[in-house]
Image (spheres, rainbow, N blue to C red):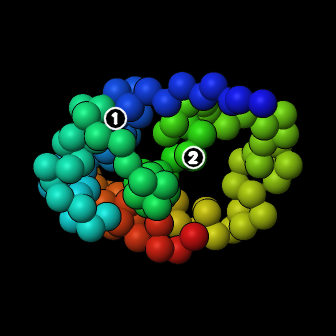
């Protein structure tokens, strides 16, 4: 039996670009983060190149998206979300509230720095 799965490199590239821009990361910084060249990332974003599976996994991990979203554009939709199971904050409500309390004390510039720091370290924590 033959599976006809249409992989659209242009759409994958557009999703990479959109997610990277949403995280406010330059192409060069993103390329450095995942140990690729900025030129290669540009080719991927334009849909001119097809990437290996390890590269795709690394990109998805660093953009904090699923492979399903990256390849097909499908958002993860569960009938029971984490919020429904644990409430808005999850099991660690006290920790979230402590973090939010600290973040409320930060300036706009400090919040932007924390955002960049989180974007950088999250892939290594999972």
Q: For the residue carrying disc 1, how many other residues have a C-alpha within 10 Å: few (<14), some (14-19), or many (20+)?
A: many
State the CA–CA distance, disc 2 to disc 1.
14 Å
Q: Which is more N-terminal, label 1 or label 2?
A: 1
**Residue positioned 51% across, 36% down in the render:** 71
**Label disc, if present, on residue 84 of the rendered structure:** none
- In this rendering, does residue 57 appear at all? yes
| Rendering coords of residue 24 (x, y %) | 26, 46
| Rendering coords of residue 103 (x, y %) | 42, 61
Q: Quadrant of residue 9?
A: top left
**Label disc, if present, on residue 13 of the rendered structure:** 1
Say above or below: 35 vs 86: below
Give the left or right position of residue 93, taking residue 30 as reference. right
Task: State the quadrant of the C terminus.
Answer: bottom right
- Work out whether residue 85 or residue 32 is closer to the camera in this orientation and state it: 32
Name the residue beneath numbered marker 2.
Answer: 66
| Rendering coords of residue 20 (x, y %) | 31, 44
- In this rendering, does residue 18 appear at all? no
């Amino acid at each position: 039996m033959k599976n006809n799965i249409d992989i659209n490199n242009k759409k994958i590239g557009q999703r990479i670009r959109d997610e990277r821009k949403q995280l406010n990361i330059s192409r060069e910084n993103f390329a450095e983060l995942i140990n690729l060249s900025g030129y290669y990332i540009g080719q991927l974003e334009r849909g001119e190149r097809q990437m290996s599976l390890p590269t795709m996994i690394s990109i998805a991990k660093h953009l904090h998206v699923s492979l399903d979203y990256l390849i097909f554009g499908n958002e993860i939709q569960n009938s029971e979300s984490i919020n429904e199971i644990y409430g808005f904050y999850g099991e660690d409500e006290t920790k979230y509230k402590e973090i939010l309390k600290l973040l409320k004390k930060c300036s706009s510039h400090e919040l932007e720095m924390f955002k960049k720091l989180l974007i950088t370290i999250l892939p290594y924590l999972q």
